[in-house]
Image (cartoon, helix red, strand yellow):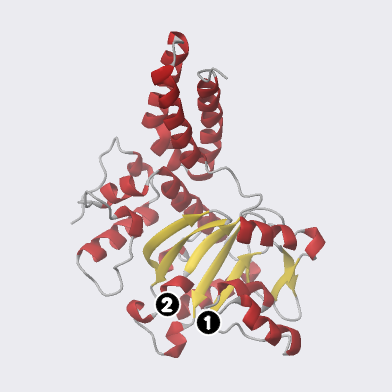
Amino acid sequence: MHPDPPAESPYAALPEDLRETIVRSFVDRLAGAAGTAQNLMFGFRDPAPKTAWDALDHLGPMAMNLLVRLFHRIEGIDHTGATFREILWIRNQWWGGSAGIKVVYRNPAAMRRRLDEMLLGPHGKRVVRDAYMGGLEHQLRPAIKLLPRALFGAARAELPDADTWREVDVPLQEGTHFCVGKGDLRGFERPEGRPAALDDIHLDWTSPVEGVDEPTGRCNYLEPWEGSVMHWLEAKLGHGAPVFTFEVARKVITRGKELARASARGAGVSRFQAIATRWARDEMAFAVRGRFGYEASKARLDEIERAVRALDPR
């Protein structure tokens, strides 16, 4: 039996389904279950974690905030929680031009059916399958090699390696993008046989979808000049991505500590040290609040940056 987080821990505030998935990912990896070697990948650092909560400490507040934000996004799509519960294990996280998690689904075929059922938004926001062009960046082969099939093939060409779905009610806003690899359709039913890179759920900072193409039941995309180019620039180059406050704050505080050691401004040093101490105390509490915590962290980052600027003699 894995221990619950202490009552005073920020992790005690995590939604129950998310906590269970994190613990399952940790426990199954520790037990050596097949296909778990990448579970909570960046949480298995030195010293080796003894609990899932140790692993989350290693992951850090930016990864933690991303996990909670994704959970809330999926919960907004399906209030029943059934879609999130299709995730068996969480692997690694990333953030940049997009931000997301690599996952292992309990049953990829069931996940596809569930996402297809979201077309009408029975429990929340609508999710719709990508057309061929919209899912090219999430295949095993480079998009440029797959493009001729879209240009010279049928309008309903099928994506070769992974099916993908997007939220369609959030044009030009942050939207969720689901990817389900087709390994199970080729006989790779067990997690260790599926290409790990293809099963993921991530946030696009600017959704390129404006609705549903009724004849095909697939995504209808914005014209390039309306937002699709912006989405591509974000995803590929990171242009326009949000400030990753938890990551930036740590770098700014490190700079502040360097300046404080050389500063003769006693009051400014004391103020900076107090602010840095408060951030160290509060950062994970912000992180586990998802989007609301992120917005609060932006205000706190501004306060940290002002305190550090006051120490800079230039």
Q: Position of residue 161 (x, y in %)?
A: 53, 82
Q: Position of residue 98 (x, y in %)?
A: 57, 57
Q: Position of residue 78 (x, y in %)?
A: 53, 61
Residue 82's tag is: none
- Amino acid carrying label 2: it is Pro
Q: Which residue is mark 2?
A: 195
Image quarter hosting the C terminus: top right
- Amino acid carrying label 1: it is Asp
C-beta proximity under 8 Å, tags 2 and 1: yes
Image quarter hosting the N terminus: bottom left
Label located before the other in sequence (2 or 1): 1
Q: Secondary structure at mark 1?
A: loop
Is residue 285 visible to the viewer in this orientation of the structure?
yes
* Residue 157 vertical position relative to residue 212 in the rendered view, above or below: below
Is 136 situated left or right of 293 in this image?
A: right
* Residue 143 vertical position relative to residue 202 in the rendered view, above or below: below
Q: Which residue is mark 1?
A: 161
* Residue 269 vertical position relative to residue 186 in the rendered view, above or below: above
Residue 228 location, quadrant = bottom right
